[in-house]
Image (cartoon, rainbow, N blue to C red):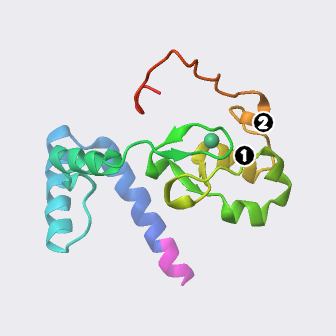
């Protein structure tokens, strides 16, 4: 086992030295060969997704709108930016004082990734409503739709 590690380590060192001195043409050729090999082996090549794929992914991610209310900072978020507060409540019972117990989509209490990171370490999130970062009340003479609101 040790022999194998030594051999692989010396091979890597040798490869790194060779690659440091190779020309741009050699490098392009080597990478093209590697890509071809990866594709024949069915490996996931990182630059195989096209711009159209990425645009499709973005549209899927934002299709349901920012409807998820963070129970800590009271801001609206997209689905991919929130997680349920249930596990956090169980694992860190001390943080309950920073939560507003607000449920939104599917009647679930959501928490944003930012607040989640602070609360997991038992720290108060800078944008927490309990940190004085409340939204001002909307005056009655503002006739706003849901998005404007
Ligand atoms: Zn939050």
The secondary structure making up most of the magenta span is helix
- Outermost residue toward the right in this view: 94
Q: Nearer the viewer, residue 33 or 13?
A: 33
User: What's the mark number on residue 130?
Assistant: 2
| Picture quadrant where residue 12 is located | bottom left
- Outermost residue toward the front in this view: 140
Position in image of residue 17 (x %, y %): 37, 49
- The image shows residue 147, relative to residue 2, as above or below, that is above
Element type at mark 2: helix
Q: Residues within 10 Å of mark 2 (few under 14, many from 20)?
A: some
State which image quarter holds ligand 1.
top right
Position in image of residue 148 (x %, y %): 42, 25
- The image shows residue 41, relative to residue 112, as above or below, that is below
Left or right, 60 with respect to 99, comes to left
What distance separates the C-alpha of mark 2 from that of mark 1? Answer: 8 Å
| Picture quadrant where residue 24 is located | top left
The answer to which of marks 2 and 1 sits earlier in the sequence is 1
Element type at mark 1: loop
Residue that carries the numbered disc 1 in the rendered image? 100
Q: Nearer the viewer, residue 14 or 101?
A: 101
Left or right, 126 with respect to 45, comes to right
Q: What's drawn in magenta, residue-wise?
A: 1-6
Q: Is residue 113 magenta?
A: no
The N terminus is located in which quarter?
Answer: bottom right
Q: Residue at 68% of width from left, 65% of height from top? A: 87
């Amino acid at each position: 086992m040790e022999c194998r590690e030594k051999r692989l380590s010396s091979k890597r060192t040798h490869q790194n030295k060779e690659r440091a001195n190779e020309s741009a043409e050699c490098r392009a050729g080597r990478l093209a060969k590697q890509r071809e090999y990866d594709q024949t082996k069915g490996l996931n090549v990182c630059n195989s997704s096209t711009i159209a794929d990425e645009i499709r992914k973005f549209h899927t991610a934002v299709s349901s709108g920012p409807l998820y209310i963070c129970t800590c900072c009271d801001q609206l978020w997209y689905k991919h930016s929130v997680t349920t507060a249930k596990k956090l409540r169980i694992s860190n019972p001390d943080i309950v004082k920073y939560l507003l117990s607000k449920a939104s989509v599917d009647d679930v209490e959501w928490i944003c990734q930012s607040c989640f990171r602070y609360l997991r370490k038992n720290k108060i999130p800078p944008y927490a409503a309990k940190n004085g970062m409340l939204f001002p009340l909307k005056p009655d003479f503002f006739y706003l739709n849901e998005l404007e609101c």
